[in-house]
Image (cartoon, coloured by chain):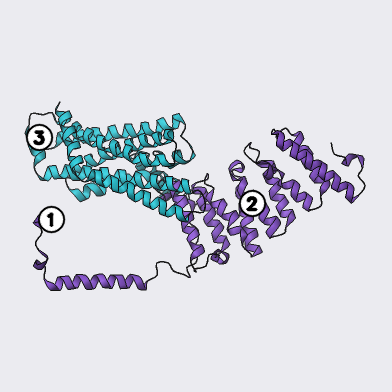
Chain colours: A cyan, B purple
Amino acid sequence: MPTANLVRLVLLEARRGALPWLAIAAVALSLCLAVFLSQVALTESRALQAAIVAAVLRACAVFLVAAHVAASVLREIDDKGLELMLSLPLARSAQYAGRFFGFAACAVAIALFFALPLLVWVPAPAVAYWAVSLALEATLMAAATLFFAMSLGQLLPAIAASAGFYLLARTMASIQAIAAGPHRDESLADRFARWAVDAVALLFPRLDSVTRTEWLLYGAPAPSAYAAAVGGLVLYALLLVAAGLFDFHRRGA
Amino acid sequence: MRSELRPLSAVPFWICALLAVTLGLQFAWRLTRPAVQESAELPPPPRHGALRLASFAEEPAAARLAMLYLQSYDYRAGNRTSYQKLDYERLTGWLDAIQALDPRSDYPLFSAARIYAENPDAARSRRMLEYVYQAFFDDPARRWPALAHAAIVAKHRLKDLPLALRYARAVERHATGSDVPLWAKQMEIFILEDMDELEAARAMIASLLESGRIHDPAEIRFLRDRLRELAARQARGKPPSDSRQPR
């Protein structure tokens, strides 16, 4: 029950804040950009519109969720609300889980809302694949930002860490491909660099293989590939929640 | 929050003046600086890895935005045909990098065949047609429209029938999907006719009919009519032997 109350409070805070308006503004911005760019396209104007709207809304969903989580958690810390909560006879796991599920619900709501405009250009099944993937991706970022905000305790480092984490997770496959490219030499330093890149990649989820715009333009992915991609997201989100719980239980009152 | 604001008169005059002057200077500065450098040359194409990294795993959107960026060089001199002056080595490098970013996009080859290949400069046009021809073999089922258009450009603009035949032949032999229309499959025949290779054109139609790839009755009827027409033309040109008679 305390978890459910916390979820309700998080959702109430999101509804009363600027989050819904920012989500609407993001949709409007992406549609305007798509319409503008399609005016200068010589071909594939519908594909261009769908791709631009999907790419912009994906970035906006993640940014809005991460910024909302960081601002909400750090306001609670700065207002001593977290200290008050920790002094109550509530299990710390329940408190952390309540916040996480609340932010995850916000992430899912934003992802579903952002999927709606894509129905103008893309068949519903492909949009459904994309929307579920975006919901899980935004949930993962909510878990990551919650972890960074709780452990770093300051707004700027928390947002910087979340942004760095997200950008690296999306580009790590490209970085690995460049590191293993045909122009490398076989020196010790080069092998060490490639090994280091591969080792760092183990720490990140494969965000480059989820919420793919190709699913919208060229048809739904193979079920096995899709399951593997979103399964990786779920696994990593659980890892982040476990890390957050570990850190939260060690936190001084 | 509005009610917490103090009246405008609370702001010192010099701050209002500074705000107005700096805003005016900003507008003036922007107005004196054109948004686009008119004489800008097309930069060297990016490496595929770099372009993919810059796309942040949004390859389809990045590929189409890169095409719009490339397209913007057509308009740099306020002239809609300024692509004629572009460095075509760089241009094909860009098209190649963009196509590699999203191999299923039609945009790069569409632009290559329908815009950049229609350059009055024959050398540039041939360079672009060759790019389309090479790129076609990576995905003939999807890319045949660009090569079919390349054949038309080679035939009508360059007046190079052997080159057009080479492209038409590639379409006929490699684009074997059921969605490839009859006109594309038949381009080779028409070019052979134009080259006065009537016997080869007849053989081509006959093999097309015998291959079983044509199922539509209207298409079959059309091809048989064409076969008869060619035989009549041959008969008018020189006395036909038995082997040249229509089936």
Tell me if residue B49 can be seen: no
Q: How crowded is mark 3: few (under 14 residues within 10 Å), some or many (20 or more)?
A: some
Closer to the camera in the image, A130 or A124: A124
Tell me the subunit letter for badge 1. B
Closer to the camera in the image, B10 or B102: B10
Q: Which residue is drawn at 24% across and 48% down?
A: A159
Whole-percent x and y of residue A150? Answer: 18, 41
Which is more foreground, mark 2 or mark 1? 1
User: Is residue A196 found left or right of B207 in the rendered image?
Assistant: left
Q: Which mark is residue A86?
A: 3
Q: Is residue B115 above or below residue B167?
A: below
Q: Mark 2 points at which residue?
A: B149
Whole-percent x and y of residue A157? Answer: 22, 49
Q: Residues within 10 Å of mark 2 (few under 14, many from 20)?
A: many
Quadrant containing the C terminus of chain B in the rendered view: top right
Q: Name the residue under label 1.
A: B2
- Looking at the rendered structure, the secondary structure element under dot 2 is helix
Q: Quadrant of residue B12?
A: bottom left
User: Disc 1 marks which amino acid?
Assistant: Arg
- Looking at the rendered structure, the secondary structure element under dot 3 is helix
Q: Do the residues labelled 1 and 3 touch (CB within 8 Å)?
A: no
Q: Is residue A31 above or below residue B121?
A: above
User: Disc 2 marks which amino acid?
Assistant: His
- Looking at the rendered structure, the secondary structure element under dot 1 is helix
Q: Residue at x 19, y 48 (%)?
A: A155
